[in-house]
Image (tube, rainbow, N blue to C red):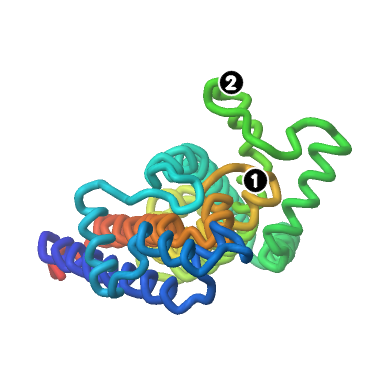
């Protein structure tokens, strides 16, 4: 087990380094001059050159990359070109919204997946199974932004149960903030939940065909008891793996959904930074999102080892 975790930690570090290099290179080759965007097209060449030197953009790329990474290791993310405030202040405020949104979304996804997937597997080839799989296929096909608009029309405009957008701030109370995040969470969770539901159903049905399950049933154990005692733990292994993969899709989906609901999270922040050519903000936010995805996949790998005793036995 210790060797397995050590390998995963090494992979995590290498992946983070590779991600930082890719992010920096992509921002380098993108068109647009931050100094020109800040000063405007009517600015003189002298003013643009002076601002470029002030921002440190006239230095060689390798030096700027190293300074960026060294700053991150020291907890200094630099100063926003557009807002003239520390980047961490912008990210901190956005994180306080995006992280609860992501947590709510993944919780809803897992609840939907387990409820639908287990019920469909327990009623294989019956009307409930066929109906739920048809609904899940529809959920996979619906784009997040379109579903977000439908949810706003139904629950905010027609029924007036939930706010159509915006975020009140945590000072206004937990309930008000959770109400503001519920529709965006549903918009993000639907596609992920539908995918996980189909994976859960397939995994449960596959485990049901194993010899030890047939033995348990032959000894008189009911189908429901067999499902909870013997099937579920082994069936969750591929579900956990896909959950880690889908978490990346969920985070990238926040870029669109947060803008639909006018929520000032990381998605909105990175989109505004791209429009302002605020490269230092874009680099740090995208690296943060990549880190979150990589860490979640690391946690999934560890949980995989906890659930599957074969990994412990071989200590790989």
Horizontal and vertical percent for residue 256? 63, 57
For marks 2 and 1 on the same chain, the one whose residue lies earlier in the sequence: 2
Q: Position of residue 49 (x, y in %)?
A: 43, 67
Q: Which quadrant of the structure image shows residue 52?
A: bottom left
* Residue of label 1: 184
Q: Is residue 126 visible?
A: no
In the picture, measured across the screen, residue 190 lies left or right of residue 88, that is: right
- Indicate left or right for 301 with 175 as reference: left
Mark 2 Cα within 10 Å, few/some/many (few <14, many 20+)? few
Q: Toward which corner of the image does residue 219 lie, by quadrant?
A: bottom left
Quarter of the image where the N terminus is located: bottom left
Residue at 47 percent of width and 38 percent of height: 93
Left or right: residue 86 versus residue 202 is left
Left of 155 or right of it: where is 32?
Answer: left
Residue drawn at x 40%, y 70% as measured from the top left:
210
Is there CB contact under 8 Å for labels 2 and 1?
A: no
Residue at 74% from the left image edge and 55% from the top image edge: 147
SS for tag 2? Answer: helix
| Secondary structure category for the residue under label 1 | helix
Q: Residue 106: x percent and y percent?
A: 51, 49
Between 220 and 98, the residue placed more toward the observer is 98
Is 77 drawn above or below residue 94 in the view shown? below
Looking at this view, is 82 or 214 the one in front? Answer: 82
User: Mark 2 or mark 1: which is in front?
Assistant: 2
Residue 183 location (% of width, % of height) = 68, 42
Q: Return the residue at label 2.
A: 172
Asked which quadrant contains residue 230, the reply is bottom left
């Amino acid at each position: 087990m210790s060797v397995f975790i050590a390998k995963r930690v090494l992979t995590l570090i290498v992946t983070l380094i590779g991600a930082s290099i890719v992010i920096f290179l992509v921002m380098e080759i993108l068109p647009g001059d931050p100094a020109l965007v800040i000063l405007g097209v009517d600015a003189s060449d002298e003013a643009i050159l002076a601002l470029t030197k002030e921002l440190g953009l006239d230095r060689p790329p390798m030096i700027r990359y190293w300074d960026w990474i060294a700053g991150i290791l020291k907890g200094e993310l630099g100063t926003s070109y557009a807002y003239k405030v520390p980047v961490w202040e912008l990210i901190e405020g956005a994180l306080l919204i995006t992280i609860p949104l992501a947590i709510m979304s993944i919780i809803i996804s897992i609840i939907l997946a387990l409820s639908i997937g287990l019920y469909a597997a327990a009623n294989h080839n019956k009307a409930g199974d066929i109906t739920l799989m048809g609904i899940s296929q529809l959920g996979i096909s619906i784009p997040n932004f379109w579903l977000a608009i439908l949810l706003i029309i139904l629950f905010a405009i027609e029924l007036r149960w939930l706010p159509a957008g915006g975020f009140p701030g945590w000072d206004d109370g937990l309930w008000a903030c959770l109400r503001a995040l519920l529709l965006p969470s549903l918009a993000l969770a639907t596609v992920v939940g539908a995918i996980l539901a189909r994976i859960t159903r397939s995994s449960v049905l596959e485990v049901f065909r194993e010899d030890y399950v047939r033995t348990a049933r032959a000894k008189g154990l009911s189908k429901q008891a067999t499902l909870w005692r013997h099937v579920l733990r082994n069936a969750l292994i591929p579900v956990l793996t896909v959950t880690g993969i889908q978490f990346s899709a969920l985070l990238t989906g926040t870029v669109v959904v947060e803008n639909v609901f006018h929520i000032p999270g990381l998605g909105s922040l990175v989109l505004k930074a791209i429009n302002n050519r605020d490269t230092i903000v874009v680099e740090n936010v995208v690296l943060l999102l990549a880190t979150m995805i990589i860490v979640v996949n690391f946690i999934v790998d560890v949980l995989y080892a906890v659930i599957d005793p074969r990994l412990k036995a071989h200590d790989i």
